[in-house]
Image: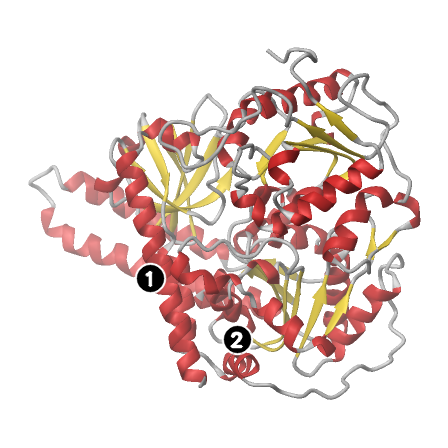
Amino acid sequence: MIEDYIKHLLSLINRERDHEREVMLKEIRDLTADERERKGRAVNNLSGKFIKKELNKYIVKFSRLKNIKTEIKVGDLVIISKDNPLRSELTGTVIEKKLKSISVAFDREIPDAVFNSEIRMDLSVNDVTFARMKKNLKNLNEHGKFVIKLICQNIRFGHSKKDVDLNYRDARLNDYQKEAINQSLYTKDFFLIHGPFGTGKTDTLIELIYQEVKKGNKVLAAAESNIAVDNIVERLAKVSGLDITRLGHPQKVSKDIKSQTIVCKLEKHELYSKIERINKDVDRLSKELDEIKFKSKSKSRKPFLINEIRRNKKIIRNTEKIIMEDIINESQVILTTNSSAARDELSNIEFDVAIIDEASQTTIPSILIPIAKAKRFILAGDHKQLPPVVSSDSAKELEETLFEKFIEKYPSKKQLLNVQYRMNEKLMKFPNLEFYNGELICYEKVKDSSIDIVREDLDIDSPLVFIDTSNHPKRQETRLKYSKSYVNMLEAKLALKIVNDYLDLGFDEEDIGVISPYSDQVNIISNETDVEVKTVDGFQGGEKEIIIISTVRSNEKGKLGFLEDLRRLNVSITRAMKKLIIIGDIETLNHNDTYKRLIEDCRSENTVIEFKSEMEELE
């Protein structure tokens, strides 16, 4: 049974990988470079410059004068080309992303001339991630097989909680957070921390890691995304007495995070001077080798130089390996993405516990990588929010996560964090009742938090406002040429008007966010404003004082597309701290019972505004 399930997972991985590659190739063939950039999956008109060599990787910085807006993120594999990505074999991994530049790590040295100008960067399928998942499944150890057994069989668990009076570092923790920490510390196998929006999940994990280290345990802390890992690193860096190391390249480059990276620690190690000295010898020998290539004399020395360069590079690699093993062995906490937990540096390390954030956003093959490294594991997430992104219909089963399976199958192994600190009580009311059975409690100090300034038009003195476009003649959705996404020009203009009005009233750009389920709508709005505009997926984990949602769909048949995934609705409406403005066509949205209840809720509070043609023009 276990072997059959592993084979099934391998089949699903192959289907997803093949589908992603097929979609990528078709898109590159069918779309122009500019069209692909508008979709967020390419960046054009770049020039590159070699920056440095780092851990046997060659770092090139690609930049341009125009700001870069793209879905490409740290950890992604990209194709570098001058015209046709399909003809290029030059691929690298994104290690840093800034406003006007993206830095990429390559496995080999590439002349600067290749990157002089007019370079195109395309998002590619990350074969490394798929390969790591497959390798882990094919060589699954006893820890990993135990998880498969938990999935395939029904196992009974006894009571593992110990009522220990812990000395908590964070005095702000509530009783539910403390209970989750206590249960996690003393479980013999696994535990689940269910952390809905704004319930202090990260605070809980930080305390849990601290308490695990205090017990003398070696901790592997992981998450699916680089950003989530960095958030934990940034918080742990402020906890005194912890020796932590971040593997891989962080998304954030703050001083606190950079000092905790394996690269930074390697450069500060006492053996690093040896690497620097040998690197100078390699540069000197390489320069001499380049010179004799163009001379008839001294060619007899060429084999010697080549062998010396190879020998010195081997010494560098071995020394780096010794240093990294030393750093990892000395570290109390290792932090990494799920995929990077498969790195060679961790191959011989067994952790006492793996603590995995974003567990409801990661597939089973991915989460099995860090789990297999530890004797126990703790999963934290919220299965009522967005699942992992799976593009292949034939692999949709991967959307059902280990967290979701276990929270239903083993309810005695979970703890709900139910004190909500983000939004006021009125904003919390609907998602609490609709998605969490009314179990969430609003923290007293945010219960009545609100925005003092009320705009004169298209606004009501209420935290939640619904602007109905169903009676406007220009309300209909449409599609851009060659796109499968949707846009709604009326809603885009209306969202921008609201954003600008709040900016005029003195709110900072950082206070406002715009969300839409459709990437083309996001692109249209983001091109006209500097406030943060993202898809629902892009905003998961984020929060703003004011959130404006453009639902986009407006059609006579009541087709809702993406909106039918109610987890997207949950994420959208739980990003706002004080003010939520939803723009949509009520006649279309009413075809779904959940949206209908949301609208009825707004009507009962008299917070629905009808936006009609005779109102102020938005041109």
Give the foreground label among 2 and 1.
Answer: 2
Which is nearer the eye, 519 or 236? 519
Which residue is disc 1 drawn over?
314
Depicted 472 relative to depicted 214: above or below: above
Which residue is disc 2 drawn over?
372
* Residue 556 left/right relative to 544: left
Whole-percent x, y for residue 141 in the image: 47, 81
Q: Amino acid at mark 2?
A: Ala
Q: Residues within 10 Å of mark 1 (few under 14, many from 20)?
A: few
Residue reaching furthest left? 296
Whole-percent x, y for residue 375 in the image: 60, 80
Q: Sequence-wise, which precedes: disc 2 or disc 1? A: 1
Quadrant occupied by the N terminus:
bottom left
* Callout 2 touching callout 1 (CB < 8 Å): no
- Gap in Å between the C-alphas at discs 2 and 1? 30 Å
For image coordinates 72% across by 52% down, the residue present is 235
For image coordinates 57% across by 64% down, the residue present is 327
Q: Amino acid at mark 1?
A: Lys
For image coordinates 72% across by 70% down, the residue present is 213
> Does residue 545 appear anywhere in the picture?
yes
Question: Circle 2 sits in a helix, a strand or a loop, which is it?
Answer: loop
Depicted 430 relative to depicted 204: above or below: above
Which is nearer the eye, 303 or 215? 215
Whole-percent x, y for residue 147 in the image: 55, 79
Question: Circle 1 sits in a helix, a strand or a loop, which is it?
Answer: helix
Depicted 66 relative to depicted 615: above or below: below
Number of numbered discs visible in the structure rendering: 2
